[in-house]
Image (cartoon, rainbow, N blue to C red):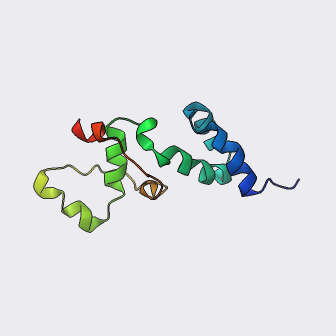
Amino acid sequence: MIPLPNECLIKILSNFKSNYRCLFSCLLVNRHWCRIIVPFLWNEPTEYFNDKRLIRTYVLLLNAEEQTLLIPFEIIIPNYPKPLFEYTRYATSIGIYLMME
């Protein structure tokens, strides 16, 4: 069976941009779909994720030098593995209310 070209998958999946549950389900189909869907979910992450986990994910993506800059502010760096994707590449905006929490 011939796989669908990426362009077709992107076009089809872009119709579900506002449906988090559908996108998340499609994300679990396989790695190929996952790579296509992650940019949709992380384009405007505060639409889907609006809690401290989003900040934690961003902090985990900082390199060691950037993380050391947070030490004077007593920001605790979680001891979790680095995320699979460089999610910050995909974000085009972030809700200001998230920073106020």
Determine whether, in the image, residue 49 is placed left or right of residue 67.
right
Residue 90 versus residue 3: which sits nearer the camera?
90
Q: Residue at x 71, y 44 (%)?
A: 12
Report the residue that reaches farthest toward the left: 72
Residue 36 x %, y %: 62, 52
* Position of 9 relative to 48 (above/below): below
Residue 30 versus residue 55: which sits nearer the camera?
55
Q: Residue at x 55, y 49 (%)?
A: 38
Q: Residue 15: tell me if it is visible.
A: yes
Determine whether, in the image, residue 90 is placed left or right of residue 74.
right
* Position of 63 relative to 43 (above/below): below
Residue 70 x %, y %: 18, 57
Report the residue that reaches farthest toward the right: 1
Q: Residue at x 42, y 56 (%)?
A: 88
Residue 99 x %, y %: 25, 42
Figure quadrant of the C terminus: top left
Q: Residue at x 58, y 39 (%)?
A: 17
* Position of 100 relative to 56 (above/below): above
* Occupied quadrant, residue 69: bottom left
